[in-house]
Image (tube, rainbow, N blue to C red):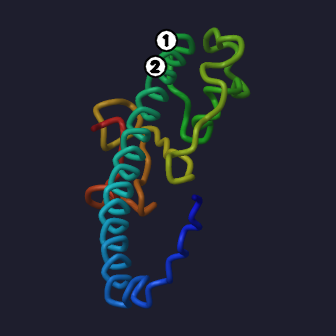
Amino acid sequence: MFRKPIPKKPRKDAGFTLTEIMVVVFIIGLLSTVVLFNVLGARTDAQVKTARTNVSALTNALEQYSLDMYDYPTTEQGLDALVNEPAGTSSAGSYRKGGYINKVPMDPWGRPFVYERPGDRSNKPYDLYSLGADGEQGGDEENADIGNWN
């Protein structure tokens, strides 16, 4: 009436050969490399765009400061003048209560933005820029300076 199922014998050729495993490892490595290059490129683009956005926001804050104080901060006062009222400016104009920004951002590479007054690279009375990925003056592509003249 009831028959017991006959257990199957394991096949001796079950499993993967070394060649098959090596092909799979090679394909995974190739795909990982392609993905890595695409992700790193996107990161660099994002850092450059972030630097441009920060320069634009700081430029707007400097323009607001200038409208209220009738001048731009000196190089010595720097961008900190947008957060804290510089000493000796109470008679010059009307410093906005609370400042013009909450905090001075760092550039996307973790360095402070450069603020120089008078400026010689832009058509404004000051230069405001990031030194780019390499942290040095000049450069090309992601290493190029990103400033208020771009």
> What residue lies at 34% left-to-right and 30% top-to-bottom?
124
Q: What's the CA distance linking mark 1 and mark 2?
A: 6 Å
Residue 146, image x, y percentages: 36, 45
Look at the numbered disc 2 and give the secondary structure of its residue: helix
> What residue lies at 32% left-to-right and 89% top-to-bottom?
19
Q: Which residue is denoted by mark 1 in the rendering?
A: 67
- Label total for image: 2
Question: Is residue 86 shown left or right of residue 143?
Answer: right
Which sits in the foreground, 143 or 117? Answer: 143
Look at the numbered disc 1 and give the secondary structure of its residue: helix
Q: Which residue is denoted by mark 2 in the rendering?
A: 63
Q: Residues within 10 Å of mark 2 (few under 14, many from 20)?
A: some
Which sits in the foreground, 1 or 114? Answer: 1
Residues at discs 1 and 2 in contact (Cβ within 8 Å): yes
Which sits in the foreground, 26 or 38? Answer: 26
Mark 2 belongs to which amino acid?
Glu
Q: Which of the 4 quarters of the picture holds residue 92?
A: top right
Instruction: Establish if 128 lies above or below 92.
Output: below
Residue 24, image x, y percentages: 35, 76
> What residue lies at 50% left-to-right and 83% top-to-bottom?
9
> What residue lies at 55% left-to-right and 29% top-to-bottom?
73
Mark 1 belongs to which amino acid?
Leu
Q: Residues within 10 Å of mark 1 (few under 14, many from 20)?
A: some
Quadrant where the image shows the C terminus: top left
